Image (cartoon, rainbow, N blue to C red):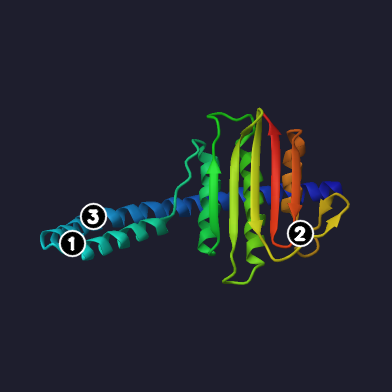
């Protein structure tokens, strides 16, 4: 039984890894495409703004600048932590969350090197964000969906905090939260717990009627 679960967990981790790399590829491709479009349109935008300026059409110029600024905002920020694998994970998941109309607030401050293996870090963060996005999707469209991510170093420990809105109150079985997925699934929670145990870390999960939060501490 244990060997069967271990194999399923390993297969799940490999699927997560491949999925994150695919999301990163799509995200990078989309960014390069957007850059090419902006480079192509750059001169046209300048000519339009110069024409408004020469004709004294300051209100029209202001409206045009506001429209350009809005388009840039829609592209969203790009997370650059210096860790390429983590960047791939974060940017892919954040892009997916925003596409689902989830408001994302993210702050990541990390040292150049971490003792946590890149694979483990990516699987940990990927599963946390995957579960968070799923929690947001339990809300009806039009409701305030949000996802908050913070990563940093606290007292020589890697600190990861993920909080999300949700509409389903999770139930506990002993000290563990019961997965809302169908029977035999919920391996993401097991994968997170496995990585935390591997690094002798600590995990804290809390939820109420509208927010689910997970905090992870891994010794550095």
Q: Position of residue 209 (x, y in %)?
A: 73, 62
Name the disc covering residue 48, or none.
Answer: 1
Left/right of residue 58 with respect to residue 128 in the rendered view: left
Crowding at mark 3 (Cα within 10 Å: few <14, some 14-19, many 20+) = few
Q: Residue at x 72, y 40 (%)?
A: 195
For the residues bearing labels 3 and 1, Cβ distance under 8 angstroms: no
User: Mark 1 or mark 2, which has the lower sequence index?
Assistant: 1
Question: Mark 3, mark 1: which one is toward the viewer?
Answer: 1
The span from disc 3 to disc 2 (Cα, nearest Å) is: 49 Å
Find residue 192 and report its horizontal and vertical position in percent. Answer: 72, 46
What is the total number of numbered labels drawn onto the structure image?
A: 3
- Sequence-earlier tag: 3 or 1: 3
In the image, residue 215 above or below residue 133:
above
Q: Is residue 67 above or below residue 105?
A: below
Residue at the disc numbered 2: 185
Distance CA(mark 3)–CA(mark 1)? 10 Å
- CA neighbours of label 1 inside 10 A, class few (<14), some (14 to 19), many (20+): few
Callout 3 secondary element: helix
Of tags 1 and 2, the one toward the viewer is: 1
Give the SS element for disc 1. helix
Query: Residue 54, position in %: x, y?
Result: 11, 59
Residue 42's tag is 3
Check residue 28 in the rendering and tell me which mark sits there, or answer none: none
Q: Could you tell me residue 78's position as x and y percent?
A: 45, 47
């Amino acid at each position: 039984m244990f060997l069967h679960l271990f194999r399923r967990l390993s297969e799940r981790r490999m699927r997560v890894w491949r999925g994150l790399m695919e999301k990163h590829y799509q995200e990078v491709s989309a960014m390069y495409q957007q850059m090419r479009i902006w480079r192509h349109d750059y001169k046209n935008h300048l000519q339009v703004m110069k024409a408004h300026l020469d004709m004294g059409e300051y209100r029209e110029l202001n409206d045009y600048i506001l429209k350009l600024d809005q388009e840039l905002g829609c592209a969203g920020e790009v997370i650059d932590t210096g860790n390429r694998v983590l960047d791939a994970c974060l940017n892919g998941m954040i892009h997916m969350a925003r596409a689902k109309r989830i408001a994302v607030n993210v702050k990541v401050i990390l040292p150049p090197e971490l003792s946590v293996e890149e694979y483990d870090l990516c699987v940990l963060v990927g599963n946390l964000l995957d579960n968070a996005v799923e929690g947001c999707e339990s809300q009806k469209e039009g409701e305030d969906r949000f996802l908050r991510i913070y990563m940093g170093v606290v007292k020589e420990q890697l600190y990861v905090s993920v909080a999300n809105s949700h509409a389903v109150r999770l139930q506990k079985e002993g000290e563990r939260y019961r997965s809302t997925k169908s029977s035999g699934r919920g391996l993401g929670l097991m994968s997170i717990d496995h990585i935390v145990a591997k690094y002798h870390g600590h995990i804290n999960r809390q939820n109420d009627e509208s927010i689910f939060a997970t905090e992870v501490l891994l010794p550095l």
